[in-house]
Amino acid sequence: MNRFCGALAFCCLLLGSCSSIERSSKNPLYEVEVVEAEGMAPLIKDGEARKSAIHDAMQSALGLVVGVYVSQESLVSKAVLIDESIKSQTEGYIEKYEVIKEWQDDKFYHVRIRAHVRKEDLAAKLSRIENEAEKLGNPVIAFQITEKLDGKDGKTAYCDTELKSVFTDKGFKVSENDSGDIIIKGDCRADFNTKEGLGGFISYRASVALKAVKSASEEVIDSVQFSAGGIDLNKNAAAQAALINAARKGGEEMRGKIISSLKKKNFISVTARGLKSMNEVVGFINSLRNIPVVRDCWLKSFGGGGAILDVALRKGNASDFSRVILKARHFKIEVLEVSAYSLLLNAEKAPN
């Protein structure tokens, strides 16, 4: 319980850090982010309090950088994993640091540090933590599948089971009933092929036709058709093998098409010029996350050309969002260019 609470506390730090962060000059070996963060520790033993406060500040520094490179849902759902693989290994991600201020009150020792966070190392770790389904907002996939054996309605669900496995293996959430964000409708059938020349084995041929539909709008995402064979010593086993083989091929193809479609239609790339520091980038991302049509957003890169963000929308497209973003809090926005899936704008921090 203590471990889980600690992880949740770390995620709260990631989502709402008050530390500041700015871009460093480019290291000849790798890129770093220069982060200013505070930490504190109770005054229990002389010397130990300062050391603990520095460690707390290093965790805060990492938390601020992590918070702009990963979606909010992953910060919460994978709190323990992030806690173990990142928070507990601050020295592995922080190249160096310096204490720029330290003080104490009656109960706590406080420090403020400037830390150099190795961005590549951290980004690589985060990319392994967050899968494609999470980046797409964790849509729930439901299945409405009919299955026939030799032209008759069967009481089997070989295709349905295999299709669910194809999606869950890649981190997708699968509905326990036939309702979800995306409905995959399909007709599957297996028919006797031959038993001649197979040394006692029986061959069946199966076909699978699938169509993915957005439940809210009835928009068809894509469709696929696949066929495959299966052999075994009896008809039921051969038909099962053929259905599973066809469902696996069709499911993998459909999964890829869903990912590709959602990336194009629900995700837009936003390039924001005018942000002068990572501190302003953090504020800008938090501002976007407060817009109702934004499901989530995170930073892809930040450099001389501006901050490049992936923005997941609940509805609408880049053109629609170009009007909504003008209402972003604490920033003056000027839209410079709009295309189907991207937005170029100038964002300046508004005076307090």
Image (tube, rainbow, N blue to C red):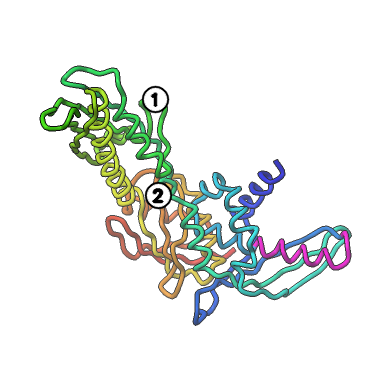
Instruction: Using the image as rendered, state which of residue 299 and residue 169 is in the foreground.
Output: 169
Q: Quadrant of residue 22?
A: bottom right
Q: Type of residue at label 2?
A: Glu
Total labels: the figure holds 2
Residue 143 % position (x, y): 32, 30
Span colored in magenta: 44-60
Tell me the residue at 36%/62% (across/down): 335
Give the x, y percent position of residue 191.
16, 26
Asked if residue 46 is among those painted magenta in the image, a careful observer would answer yes
Q: Residue at x 31, y 36 (%)?
A: 214
Mark 2 and mark 1: Cα distance apart in space: 23 Å
Q: Is residue 197 magenta?
A: no
Front residue of this view, candidates 153 and 212 = 153
Q: Secondary structure at mark 1?
A: loop
Tell me if 105 is positioned left or right of 219 in this view.
right
Residue 43 in the image: x percent, y percent?
86, 60
Residue 259: percent from the left, percent from the top? 33, 47
Residue 111, relative to residue 266: is it above or below?
below
Taking 14 as reference, is 116 above or below it?
below
Q: Which residue is mark 2?
A: 132
Q: Main secondary structure of the magenta part?
A: helix
What is the crowding at mark 1: few (fewer than 14 residues within 10 Å), some, or many (at least 20)?
few
Type of amino acid at the residue the image marks with label 1: Asn
Q: Residue at x 32, y 29 (%)?
A: 160
In the image, what residue occupies the spot 51% across and 72% down?
276
Image quarter of the C terminus: bottom right
Q: Residue furthest bottom?
A: 28
First along the sequence among labels 2 and 1? 2
Q: Which mark is residue 177?
A: 1
